[in-house]
Amino acid sequence: MKYKRVLLKLSGESLMGDKQYGIDSERVAQYASDIRDVYKKGLQIAIVIGGGNIFRGLSAEKSGMDRVQADYMGMLATVINSMALQDALEKVGMKTRLMTAIKMEQICEPFIRRRAVRHLEKGRIVIFGAGTGNPYFTTDTAASLRAIEIQADAVLKGTRVDGIYTADPEKDPLATRYNEITFQEVYDKGLNVMDLTAITLCQENKLPIIVFDMNKAGNFMRVADGEPLGTLVTG
């Protein structure tokens, strides 16, 4: 494999499958199968999942809810998604650990960097839940931060589209995809890749990001093996 250790970032919306909200068990099972196949090639895998399929703090703030309260609710939504993926991974024979930035001793471990790295070295798939544990930070930022902390080789962002486009490809049929783009170009063009805090963290720590379509079975394997799939953000 091209990488030794990666952080896979999944959006909460990706877990919905064809549903309008919630968790599609078939989609989660497909993800678990793809992750298992890559794991069996010897790759160390950490995962961060968003919570937008259950609750989104920014949307709640717009409707009048206190932003801090809404963000904490969003963090809890990421834990629900993390538990669903953990269950699916264990059903296909994977050993996992769920670690969260908010203490929930009955269901998971608190995030401790050295312990997380040790779990990875022992061959466990580590899922990081509850974002950074702080309001005003997205799960994109949590993914970048955790990837840097565990010294991952790359952030692999699995989405519903096959890369970064000049515009939203679901809305603009003339949008074209970038095969490779720099962090500075992301800033300059105002592209919606990850939030700017996450992009800045990756840029300052020279951590590449690859955006790809996770919904197509086998794509995670192709990206992890170094195939030029999706869009690479580097430089």
Image (cartoon, rainbow, N blue to C red):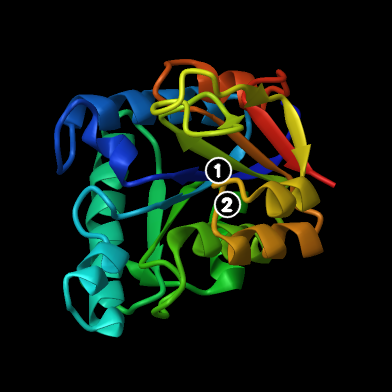
Q: 3 left or right of 46?
A: right
Are dots 1 and 2 in contact, CB under 8 Å? yes
**Which quarter of the image is occupied by the N terminus?**
top right
Image coords of residue 221 (percent x, y): 57, 21
Q: Who's the residue at 63% across and 31% down the image?
A: 42
Residue 104 in sight from this viewpoint: no
Q: Who's the residue at 33% across and 36% down the image?
A: 14
Q: Three-letter amino acid code at disc 1?
A: Ile
Q: Nearer the viewer, mark 1 or mark 2?
A: 1
Res 222 → quadrant:
top right
Res 224 → quadrant:
top right
State whether residue 186 is above or below residue 88: below
- State which tag comes first along the sequence, 1 or 2: 1
Q: Write down the residue under mark 1.
A: 45
Q: Is mark 2 on a helix, strand or loop?
A: helix
Q: Which of 83 and 158 is in front in this view?
A: 158
Q: Write down the residue under mark 2.
A: 120
Res 20 → quadrant:
top left
Q: Three-letter amino acid code at disc 2?
A: Leu
